[in-house]
Structure formats: C-alpha cells, structure tokens
Amino acid sequence: MTRDLGGKVIVITGASAGIGAATAVYAARAGMHIVLAARREDKLHDVARTVKVNGGEAMVIPTDVADREQVQQLVDQTVERFGRLDVMFANAGFGHYAGVDNLDGELDQRMWQVNYFGTVHCLQAAAAVMKPQGSGHLLITSSVLAHLGLPFYSTYSATKAAQHGLAMSLRHELAGDGIDVTCVFPVGTRTEFFETARKLDGRDVVGQNTPDMFMQSARHVAKRILAAMRRPRPEVWPSRLAHVAAAAFTMFPGLRQAALKSQAEKYRKG
C-alpha cells in the first residue's frame, strides 16, 4: 500500500547539503512537515529557503548528532512543535582517505561518533516517540561500502557496515511496534562528501578515480528515498549496477579481490 506523505513529520540530519538537502526538497513537494538538523546553521537556513520555494516550510534546529543530549532536544522540539514524529532520516556522516598506518585516532573516533553513534542516538530518540504512536519510519544513509570495504577508506567502510548491521537488527526488534527500518546504500554521490574528504586529506583520491557509472546526483538518491517512504522496504539501492556488483562480489570473492586490488593501485598513485 502506498502511503500519503502529506502532513507527515520528518527529521533530516546532515540536512545542510547533499542527500539530506535534496531529500528535504522532495519531502516539501510531498507536503511533509520538515525539520532540518546539522551543525552549520547558516547552511540549514539556505536549505530552508529552498524548501519554501518548493512549497514547504522547514524548522531549523542546529544539532551535532554525536551529542546524545542535542539529538534528544532535536526530537523533543519536533514533537513540541508538531505533536508527533513520523520519519527520522539519520543521514549525517563523513569520511576521509587514509591508509592503516596513517589513521588519525582523534579523527577516526569522531567518525565513529558521528556516523555510527550519531545514528544510534537518532534512532533511539525517534523510536521512543514512535512506539506509543504505533507507527513510524527510520531511515539510515549507509553506503555501498558497507558491503565492499574500500582500500584507504577502512574506518568509513567499517562505520557504514555497522549502520547496516544496526538496521538489520532494529528492523526485527521494532516490527511489532509498527516501525519500519530502511537502510540506503548510495554509490558515489556528487555532494560535499568528497570536498570534505579533500579538506581533511589534501586530495580527493576516491572521487577522482570513481567511474562515472558509479556516480549519482543527490537528487536521484533523494527520489529513491521518497519512494521508500511511500512504500517502505528494507533496503534502497539507488544504483542497480552497484546492487548487482555487490551481489556478484559476495558470490565470487575472487572478483571482488581483483576489483579492490585494481582500485588500491589507482589510489596509491593518487
């Protein structure tokens, strides 16, 4: 059954750019009430203005998802404003390029705090509201790298795999409460992700070496996410090619080994 999203309340983290911002626009067109969360308040207001142009209104709440108290305040303020919470889109995250001998302890711990524990904070706070409602939808932006550990992106790949495992577990834990759980597996997406990695590492090795066939726009991913909100499903693969490749690599580990070896050689040359 297709759900009408009109009047539903959605919280989007990592909403200041990329997939989060694009999802906010499509949610506005669907008639949803939108709450935008990220650390950069000025960027959130830019997105809110775009949402308004597309016929919606967005509430801006600056939030660091790594801080459990801030996430709880985000959810509390949402419920205070709208009286409910229908969709939590845990989308905040970042990555950086580093070999195992150059991993930055502080930076990699921060990545775990944002990518994984930030997701946990969002889902816990949202589920506490959705259970009494008897309905709700939790969405997580993972990555195709949850199924394919990319050379020199070990920590990022690990956090994405952890999100996938979390989603699989919660999907069954919360099924009796009327709460759907969806995990999204984008491939390379044309967002600020690669710009952030370049600022952290001084170069964008992955973005430069990713074939165009494995790059997508944030709008394309957002459309698939809205489709999953209307008809909930366990997983969203915006790229069918990536989905097929992930399945093939699972069935034929030697093929995956060859592909990763080739990519590692490209990354070393930088």
Image: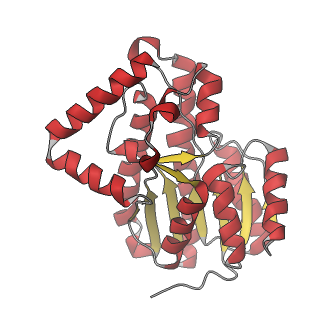
Left or right: 74 in relation to 112: right
| Res 9 → quadrant | bottom right
The colour scheme used to paint the residues is secondary structure
Near-viewer residue (14 or 195): 195
Left or right: 24 in relation to 237: right
Q: Is residue 29 above or below residue 38?
A: below
- The residue that appears at 46% across and 46% down in the rendered structure is 212
Q: In this view, does 215 lie above or below 88?
A: above
**In the rendered image, is residue 211 in sight?**
yes
Outermost residue, bottom direction? Answer: 1
Outermost residue, front direction? Answer: 212
> How many discs appear?
0
Q: Where is residue 201 in the image (x, y as percent from the top left)?
A: 58, 20
- The residue that appears at 47% across and 17% down in the rendered structure is 103
Q: In this view, does 148 lie above or below 155?
A: below
Q: Where is residue 126 in the image (x, y as percent from the top left)?
A: 59, 61
Left or right: 95 in relation to 168: right
- The residue that appears at 54% across and 56% down in the rendered structure is 123
Near-viewer residue (70 or 193): 193
**In the rendered image, is residue 32 in sight?**
no
Q: Is residue 98 above or below residue 211?
A: above
- The residue that appears at 67% across and 53% down in the rendered structure is 72
| Res 254 → quadrant | top left
Q: Position of residue 166 (x, y in %)?
A: 40, 51
Outermost residue, top direction? Answer: 101
Screen quadrant of the N terminus = bottom left
Q: Position of residue 67 (x, y in %)?
A: 66, 40
Left or right: 178 in relation to 80: left
